[in-house]
Amino acid sequence: MDQVSDEARWTTMLELALDGDASAYQNLLQGLASALRTALRSRARRAGLDNEDVVQEVLLALHMKRSTWVRGTPVAPWVAAIARNKIVDAHRRRGSRPEVSIENIVETLQTDDDGDTVGEAHDLERLLAKLPAKQRLIVSEISLQGYTALETARRLNMSEVAVRVSLHRSLKRLSAALRGSR
Amino acid sequence: MRTEALIRALVADNKRPVVPISRMLLMAVLSGMAFSAVLFGITLHVRTDIWKAIGTVRFDFKLVVTLTLAVTAAMGLPRSARPQDGNGSPWTLAASPLLVALAVAVDLLMGPHEWLRRLIGQNALHCLLLIPMLSLAPAIALLLALRSGAPLNPKAAGARAGLLASGLGATLYALTCPDDSPLFIATWYTMATGTVTALCAYIGRYALRW
């Protein structure tokens, strides 16, 4: 797939996602995960990080910061900027200060149909274990067991709103903890 | 944790409407400014000779300077809250200081030579305390809004928020301050807005990292 149509497709998908389209968001995140996995491999290694950990951190960050994307603009440079911030941060924690250019990340950030579509990492799991029991349960019902917020609410005898609020707080905590860890 | 599992959690969290960062910043400015205006109404008053003052170039110029500071700072703020845009062009920020410098030069060349009295004015201490006080609410609101942003340069984003907040605070203060001399503005207004800006930059450096 050529880069231009790819980029336009990501832009449309993210617009749909921001309007609440769950399947567009799911497809976009999966596509970005696979693209990031390929684009970041060597950079993560140089920063002394597990590649999949970085991919997950970037996905979490772009989710939390999706209000900073400007509708109608290309998605790749924005995601690349977020990825760069995370990698520079990782280097800084190790005391080095490399030049990481966005352009290089953008160039490699495109749908990679041959790329790995699955990945597993450990940082988030470790931090998940530190969440309060209730939040941990809700996150795992949704992410690991695959229940919807509504199903989770019924199973735990809570309101759907309470489940959503708790999920949101958990993700916020995880992203803050990820930044403070390592 | 498998990345698929994380993605399921993110998708489930995507239900609430997403407010663009530019709108969040706008709401922060408006609410912060409203708060400061109320504070102004309660604790201070517009100078008694306001109608006469509005007819003078020196008073109007003072408002132009403080509003220019606020507007130039506001223009680049949404950009500085985004991860890829850098801090915008810092050059437009020079507009307000340049206006002051120009006015000081004109004033020194033309005015009667009692510049020391005009420099000290009657309200230096007031100015140093009241501008930060009136900037406080917009500064807090803007820094909170910026926390939902993803600034490439947290310190610069904090500084820009400080410039905008102190520009607004100084505009309100200018309505009560009886000193209209460019020298007074160049000294005390600069010191007050500079303090607010430096403080916001310092806070931004730590609080706006993401």
Image (cartoon, rainbow, N blue to C red):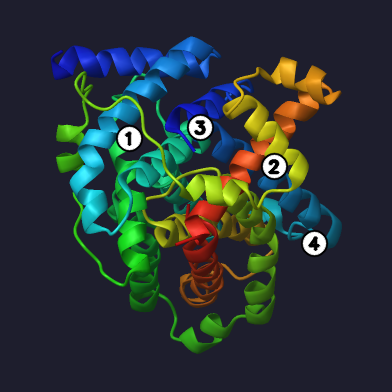
Q: In which quarter of the image is residue A69?
A: top left
Give a yes or no on whether discs 3 and 4 share a subunit.
yes
Q: Residues within 10 Å of mark 1 (few under 14, many from 20)?
A: many
Picture layout, residue B208 above or below residue B100: above
Q: Residue B150 or A98: which is nearer the viewer?
A: A98
Cα–Cα span, label 1 and label 2: 29 Å
Foreground tag (1 vs 4): 1
Disc 3 designates what residue? Answer: B6
| Amino acid at circle 2 | Ser
Cα–Cα span, label 3 and label 4: 53 Å
Give a yes or no on whether discs 1 and 2 share a subunit.
no
Q: Mark 2 lies on which chain?
A: B
Look at the numbered disc 3 and give the secondary structure of its residue: helix
Foreground tag (1 vs 2): 1
- Of the two numbered discs 3 and 2 on the same chain, state the one appearing first in sequence: 3
Q: Which residue shows up at 37% across the image and 67% down it?
A: A93
Foreground tag (3 vs 2): 3
Compared across the picture, whether A20 is left or right of B81 comes to right
Foreground tag (3 vs 1): 3
Instruction: Please state the horizontal and vertical placement of residue B204, each as a whole percent of the image.
Output: 51, 61
Foreground tag (3 vs 4): 3
Q: Residue B163 or A154: which is nearer the viewer?
A: A154
Q: Mark 1 lies on which chain?
A: A
Disc 2 designates what residue? Answer: B31
Disc 1 designates what residue? Answer: A78
Q: Which chain carries label 4?
A: B
Look at the numbered disc 2 and give the secondary structure of its residue: helix
Q: Mark 3 lies on which chain?
A: B
The numbered disc on residue B44 is 4
Look at the numbered disc 4 and give the secondary structure of its residue: loop
